[in-house]
Amino acid sequence: RKCKGHIPAAMGKKGKAPAPEVEPEEVATEPTAGGWTCAECEYEHLEEEAESAECVACGVERPPQEAGRFAGYKVGLVLECEDISAKLKGIKVDVGEGEDAALKIVTNAGNVKEGCRVVVATIGATVELKGEEVVVSRAVVGGKPSEGMLCDAPML
């Protein structure tokens, strides 16, 4: 028997419970490709907008980012390469601050040549060498000043 005004429910299906509201965190999250996501409005800033100090969508100030494990690491382009000795090379690396601000680094990496892209640990960065953490500082290597260190895969 059917009741007047009764609507039968679909068999086996229940309505979804509403999602609980979550307070946004106060840290900027990083999506892929170097951008960040606003914690207030969840707008995803692309790489081109990543340098902005505030959210483009809602105007909220970007929260400070925590310095991660790779703080002080940069990708550079080898501009010049000269042999210093049988094992050492002096290279000039542009790390994105222009050719005038290129770093001069002394390395024993035999596979480095002009036009190569390299990972550079700049002064103040922490690298892992033979299981120990070492802070990169200015040094004189082979009689030449070195303003950073090239990193290979095990260092990363």
Image (cartoon, helix red, strand yellow):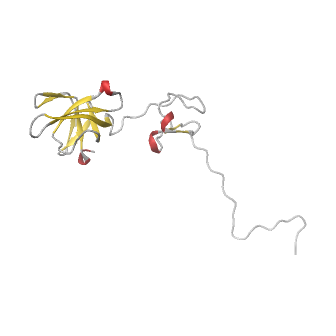
Q: Give the x, y percent position of residue 92.
A: 24, 31
Q: Residue furthest top?
A: 100
In the depicted structure, whether residue 52 falls above or below residue 118: above
Residue 137, percent from left and from top = 21, 29
- Describe residue 47's horizontal placement relative to residue 94 as left or right: right
22 above or below 54? below
Depth check: 111 or 70 in front?
Answer: 111
| Quarter occupied by the C terminus | top left
Relative placement, left or right, of 83 versus 118 is: left
* Residue sitting at the far left: 86
The image quadrant that residue 103 belongs to is top left
Residue 76 placed where, x, y %? 31, 36
**What is the count of numbered marks?**
0
Q: Position of residue 113 (x, y in %)?
A: 23, 41
Residue located farthest toward the right when viewing the structure as drawn: 4
| Residue displayed at 57% across by 39% down | 43
Identified at 45% across, 43% down, the residue is 33
Q: Is residue 155 above or below residue 63?
A: below
Q: Is residue 79 left or right of residue 131?
A: right
- State the quadrant of the N terminus: bottom right
Q: Which one is nearer the viewer's eye here, 1 or 110? A: 110
Q: Quadrant of residue 15?
A: bottom right
Q: Quadrant of residue 42?
A: top right
Residue at horizontal 39 percent and vertical 35 percent from the top: 66
